[in-house]
Image (spheres, grey):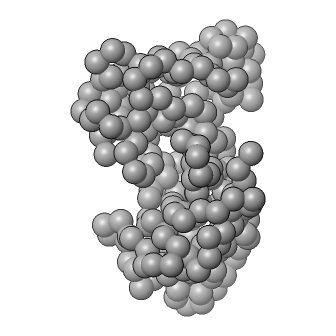
Amino acid sequence: DAKTTQPPSMDCAEGRAANLPCNHSTISGNEYVYWYRQIHSQGPQYIIHGLKNNETNEMASLIITEDRKSSTLILPHATLRDTAVYYCIAYDYKLSFGAGTTVTVRA
Amino acid sequence: GAVVSQHPSWVICKSGTSVKIECRSLDFQATTMFWYRQFPKQSLMLMATSNEGSKATYEQGVEKDKFLINHASLTLSTLTVTSAHPEDSSFYICSAKFPGQGSYTFGSGTRLTVV
């Protein structure tokens, strides 16, 4: 699996967009980019995934650069309930979690 | 949507005893399930891949004889922590992939405390 690099933490204001970066410079052509989040003491929750194209669902948007070496998860209107650890994963056949980004949404 | 049920949600056991954790896929069949372990303030560590009807595949450094995995049906995988020690105290989580979807669904986790 390609390794991913994320900032250890970030704060964002409630109601504002939260942009979470992820570097995956060694990703291979068949590896998807997955995003999960984990709220304290719970199992991870799926957010979104993509291969090449940008993706959007009811939770978030995923922007993948053309060279696929990095991506950004966008939470359009962060709420206090979005406070969690966010994991960016380069996936081929299993999900391997890195350290993630601890996102704190502040009122 | 796909739901993975994990039981129990927490368990306390004495050193030397064995503990079984169940992971069930509700309303869908999962030929493959994954087991993770998470220590406080750390990320999830993949322990093994559970395959229905065959032996589990363990990650490097995970003791096969200590963490017994049985995937006897398409909806149930179990993880048995044998001869538990305090250092086995952790948060254990399973996941499964809903057929036809790209995402994996995770259980709510089991917090094991060995005293």
Give the residue drawn at x 45%, y 49%. A95
Asked if residue B86 shows in the view, the reply is no
Taking the view exactly as shown, the residue that stands out farthest to the front is B100
The answer to which of B70 and B42 lies nearer the viewer is B70
Q: Is B113 located above or below residue A91 in the figure?
A: below
Quadrant of residue B111 in the image?
bottom right
Q: Is A9 located above or below residue B22 in the figure?
A: above
Quadrant of residue B77 in the image?
bottom right
Give the residue drawn at x 48%, y 70%. B51
Taking the view exactly as shown, the residue that stands out farthest to the top is A16
Marker count (numbered):
0
Q: Is B77 located above or below residue B13 in the figure?
A: above
Quadrant of residue A36 in the image?
top right
The answer to which of B100 and A42 lies nearer the viewer is B100
**Quadrant including the N terminus of chain B:** top right
Give the residue drawn at x 38%, y 77%. B63
Q: Is residue A20 left or right of residue B6?
A: left
Residue B21: image location, x then y, percent: 64, 74
Q: Is residue B39 left or right of residue A23?
A: right
Residue B75: image location, x then y, percent: 66, 69
Give the residue drawn at x 60%, y 33%. A47
Q: Is residue A39 left or right of residue A52?
A: right
